[in-house]
Image (tube, coloured by chain):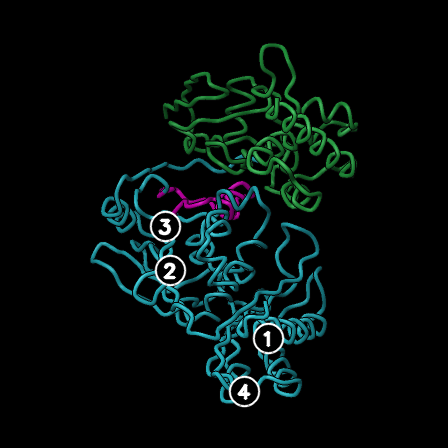
Amino acid sequence: MIPAAFEYHAPASLDDATALLARLGEDAKILSGGQSLIPLMKLRLSSPPHVVDINGIPGLSYVREADGVLAIGALTRESELEESEIVRARYPLLHDTCRVIADPLVRNLATIGGNLAHADPANDHPATMLALGAEVVARGPRGERRLPIASFFTGPFETALVPGEILVEIRIPAPAARSGGAYLKLERKVGDFATAAVAVQLTLRPDGVCEQAGIGLTNVGLTPIKAVQAEASLRGKRLDDTTIAQAARLAAAAAEPSEDLRGSVEYKKDLVRVLTGRALRKAVERAEGRR
Amino acid sequence: MRVQLSINGEKHEADVEPRLLLVHLIRDVLRLTGTHIGCDTTHCGACTVLLEGRPVKSCTMFAVQANGKSLMTVEGLEQNGKLHPLQEGFMAEHGLQCGYCTPGMLMTGYAFLGQHPTPTEDEIRVAISGNLCRCTGYVNIVKAVQHAAATLREGAAR
């Protein structure tokens, strides 16, 4: 399959890239890892007249923790996240997530910034970032702004980014003591999108009571879903069979899946309930240092 | 656009349209036809090549993105008329039936063994999970990779 013809641009700096994107407006698409964009272009579901390749811009690939924040450069490949010692040791939810995206070959090119900016509700990082309470940094011709992830996804394949802006960094609050998280995904086979997936991040007090809970849902709605009622039901409570079952029911109620080859509405909602329960238990184990 | 790249240590240059896929540059322009095109939809991995040492799907990259980069294809495995231990392993363990996925399996396996000299079966299966064998000959593919790992370890010990 051959994509429609386009004009290729490879700016060498962020300033050049944002100026170019501002000038080209809706006619341009950003090429990051290309693992979603190029398949869409080959199927001619997307035929942008201009492609702006940001891979040649230096300084957009890093994973570093400083001042209570894990900062990840938008061009960081999924395989680099997977291999990052700090992610493995301190951000189990993120580590779980980057290991189940597509397949190992795709992960050698796919980037975390692209996964978020593409805003496919079937992508995995969005739910994880909702659970983690992340922020994204957007750089445009007039400078930088920070956007809370909860207001970033405005519709299917739509974000709060405006033409001319590039997502340059993801910022995740460093976990407090007794924090843990987990990402559980059911996929029919490696490389398929999730039938459903659930991201959970918890912080417990020393007495075991839940201080903070984040829950994000993948591929059960037109956008990634933050299960706010399920989150609220856990705060101030001890996580036991009853509170976990209640939160799992509330997460299922927040899901708005549509029927497709992967399953019926009822099946997917119940899958969210089951995965939420399991993810909460795993997150508690990790928060308590039991793995 | 003018593209310059190195494949298997050899410099190549070509004038390409930006929309030309890397796999088409490799096969149709440079006539290195060992790399296969299977699904053409980023699923099967028959088109796997190494980009700066990492296995990637060459049907899901534009040729212009490889400008200035160093690539390795299946033609680069054989050295001085001698097959690579991984190729020997695929022969010894019957790691191929129709052979269509083999170039991709070999490239993924080559990069993987460089990082994992003593792999477990599980590690091999995860590593090749982006390469599909439609003959479903995975059992012997795993054995072939293990065979090569053992040969390479012997070579290193000698």
Label 1 crowding class (10 Å Cα cut-off): few <14, some 14-19, many 20+?
Answer: many
The reply to whether callout 2 and callout 3 are in contact (CB within 8 Å) is no
| Dots 4, 3 in contact, CB < 8 A | no
Q: Quadrant of residue A184?
A: bottom right
Instruction: Classify mark 2: helix, strand or loop.
Output: strand
Q: Do labels 4 and 2 share a chain?
A: yes
Q: Earlier in the sequence, mark 4 or mark 2?
A: 2
Chain letter for the part of the structure drawn in cyan: A
Real-space Cα separation, disc 1 to disc 4, in angstroms: 13 Å
Type of amino acid at the residue the image marks with label 3 = Tyr
- In 3D space, how far apart are the residues under numbered discs 4 and 2 (Cα atoms)? 28 Å
Q: Give the range drawn in magenta.
A: A30-54
Residues marked 3 and 1, same chain:
yes
Question: How crowded is the residue under tag 2: few (<14 C-alpha within 10 Å), some, or many (20+)?
Answer: many
Name the residue beneath numbered marker 1.
A280
Residue B149 position in % (x across, y down): 66, 31
Q: Name the residue under label 3.
A: A62
- Foreground disc of the pair 1, 4: 1
| Mark 4 and mark 3: Cα distance apart in space | 36 Å
| x and y percentages locating residue B63 in the rendered image | 45, 30
Residue marked by disc 4: A233
Query: Observer-nearest residue: B126 or A49?
Result: B126
